[in-house]
Amino acid sequence: DGGITQSPKYLFRKEGQNVTLSCEQNLNHDAMYWYRQDPGQGLRLIYYSQIVNDFQKGDIAEGYSVSREKKESFPLTVTSAQKNPTAFYLCASSISNLAYEQYFGPGTRLTVT
Amino acid sequence: QQQVKQSPQSLIVQKGGISIINCAYENTAFDYFPWYQQFPGKGPALLIAIRPDVSEKKEGRFTISFNKSAKQFSLHIMDSQPGDSATYFCAARQLGAGGTSYGKLTFGQGTILTVHP
């Protein structure tokens, strides 16, 4: 059963702590993306990756970091430098870097207090 | 800067009615316009998409209308059903954003659709 998995579904952290969100895909897709979803603001691109060991900043990369050591995995670290980290985070993948159909995971809701 | 503006923010429709969601853009480099549907607690899923050389695309009860000169496009849901209740996002793709050859999607703010039985 192919798809994208994100874990955990809910995550709670104290302010000042770094936290890493997991994203795994078994679709054999080259491109992967991280979005942040806030009410009334749509989906905003944090980082994206075309291939292994390659990634680019999106529109709101400040306070976030990523790695792409394996084709299947694209973890996102929310650092203490992110001023407003509480949000719903979505990982997506697409078969190529041309960003046609993107397949989304179920998301991780991060709450930082 | 919001490059794709979506309206309304929320929409309530009776079962059997027509739901209409509108989007407008400024960037003429956009070349592909998808709509995504998101149910609560889930990730978005592609619903329907259109290219700017086509004025209308229909898939079942869902239709995209595209007006290139006005830089506007809209989603029409005919015979709306309670199961259509979800958040809908329009999006626009640009190739070569940021000096790369990559495609990048820019999303609208989303519309929460509620269909009453």
Image (spheres, coloured by chain):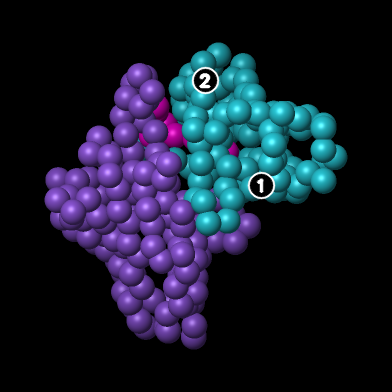
Of all chains, the one bearing label 2 is A
- The crowd level at tag 2 (other Cα within 10 Å; few <14, some 14-19, many 20+) is some
Q: Colour of chain B?
A: purple
Residue A67, placed above or below residue B109: above
Q: Do dots 1 and 2 share one subunit?
A: yes
Image quadrant holding the N terminus of chain A, namely top right
- Say what amino acid the circle numbered 2 marks: Phe
Which numbered disc flags the more N-terminal residue, 1 or 2?
2
Magenta-span inclusion, residue A46: no
Q: Position of residue A2 (x, y in %)?
A: 54, 40
**Could you tell me if residue B95 is visible in this image?**
yes
**Could you tell me if residue B37 is visible in this image?**
no
- Say whether residue B103 is left or right of residue A89: left
In this orientation, which residue lies closer to the viewer: B32 or A8? Answer: B32
Q: Which residue is found at the position 42% from the left and 83% from the top?
A: B15
Q: Position of residue B115 (x, y in %)?
A: 47, 78
Q: CA distance from mark 1 to mark 2?
A: 22 Å
Q: Which residue is found at the position 49% from the left and 85% from the top?
A: B117
In this orientation, which residue lies closer to the viewer: B80 or B90? Answer: B90
- Say what amino acid the circle numbered 1 marks: Ala
In this orientation, which residue lies closer to the viewer: B22 or A76? Answer: B22
- Say whether residue A31 is left or right of residue B29: right
Q: From the image, tell me which residue sits under label 1.
A: A87
Residue at disc 2, secondary structure: loop
Of all chains, the one bearing label 1 is A
- Residue B96 in which image quadrant: top left
Q: From the image, tell me which residue sits under label 2.
A: A55
Q: Which chain is cyan?
A: A
Which residues lie in the magenta part?
A91-99
